[in-house]
Image (tube, rainbow, N blue to C red):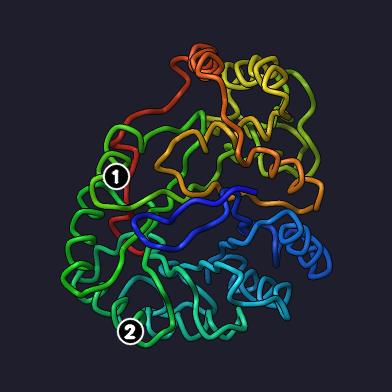
Amino acid sequence: MEYRKLGNSGMYVSEIAYGNWTTHGEQIDQEAATACVRTALDLGITTFDTADAYAGTRAETALGEALDGVRREGLEIFTKVYFPIGQPGKNDRGLSRKHIMESINGSLRRLRTDYVDLYQAHRYDYETPLEETMQAFADIVRAGKAHYIGVSEWTPEEIRRGAALAKELGIHLVSNQPQYNMLWRVIEPEVVPLSEELGLSQIVWSPLAQGVLTGKYAPGAAAPTASRFTSDGGAFKTEHRYMQQPVLEAVQALRPLANQAGLSMAAFAVAWVLQNTNVSAAIVGASRPEQLKDNATAAGVVLDPGLLAKADEVLGDLVERDPAKVESFLERP
């Protein structure tokens, strides 16, 4: 495993982070969750990403149990706040001071820890003054409940304003957590240059494009059982942009490039993300330990520039690059 600095902070994170969105508390039981977490640790993965909203708080609970007894100082635990949790009332969502303060305490209790290393605003909240949100985060940092602050899927303007307020309050806004992969590159034109200017780095989710870049969705083949893109009737959910035939065909054309790099399709996709020097970590999920072992082979890989150029050529206009696609919710969900 290789490690990178998180933004302009002094903290290192593992290049491969283990995230438990859609797995812990939903797809797999506690025994399987613990097996995956322990495999991650064996592989040198020290960074774990979750959120209070994942599986209705069950994901945090599962991660806390799986990490029980592990030396806390050797881990970087990240969680998030914004989306509705539990039995949502009018204040059980968003980034108001009330919700943030109540949410951090719940997260710490479920994670069985006194602090998280990174507390992230899961989206921007247009219903709360940014000053209120950042002051609440500053108070959490000063109370020792979080070391650093991050955001997720914020636009460039939102990031700039948040970073300025954080600086005024004397806290570190060090990261952004966006979707980023070979098919979804909307952060490259504006978010990445701004982040480099301000001292933030990316902790990216969906480096495998929700599994599409593993190549398991072959054009013309039957849809895999129990896949997120498989309907109840067993057919592909073709309405998703990743499930269009030209995309599936192009992804298959990446296989020779992965073979040339000596990697699986999944590891090639993760390694591609890590070629961006503004990326500190790629978050991967897993329901089986062997998936993690494969993904972890991407750590430390330097892909030949020629291979990267060929991947661009193969995917062509199928890649989404429009910076306007970085978009916050105008209303709380």
Rendered location of residue 15, percent (x, y): 56, 48
Badge 1, how many Cα within 10 Å: few under 14, some, many 20+? some
Label 2 sits on a secondary structure element that is: helix
Horizontal side of residue 61 vs 164, given as left or right: right
Residue 254 figure quarter: top right
Give the residue drawn at x 37%, y 61%. 9
Badge 2, how many Cα within 10 Å: few under 14, some, many 20+? few
Residues under labels 2 and 1: Cα distance?
A: 26 Å
Query: Which residue bears the numbered disc 1?
Result: 196
Kind of residue indicated by mark 1:
Glu
Horizontal side of residue 3 vs 279, given as left or right: right
Residue 213 in the image: above or below residue 156: above
Query: Which residue bears the numbered disc 2?
Result: 142
Q: Nearer the viewer, residue 184 or 53?
A: 184
Horizontal side of residue 131 vs 192, given as left or right: left
Rendered location of residue 232, percent (x, y): 74, 43
Question: Which quadrant would the C terminus be assigned to in this image?
Answer: bottom left
Give the residue drawn at x 29%, y 78%. 138
Give the residue drawn at x 62%, y 42%. 299
Kind of residue indicated by mark 2:
Arg
Number of numbered discs overlaid on the protein picture: 2
Rendered location of residue 107, percent (x, y): 53, 79
**Residue 221: image tag:** none
Residue 195 in the image: above or below residue 78: above
Rendered location of residue 72, percent (x, y): 61, 77
Label 1 sits on a secondary structure element that is: helix
Give the residue drawn at x 81%, y 63%. 35
Residue 67 figure quarter: bottom right
Q: Which badge, 2 or 1, comes first in the chain's sequence?
A: 2
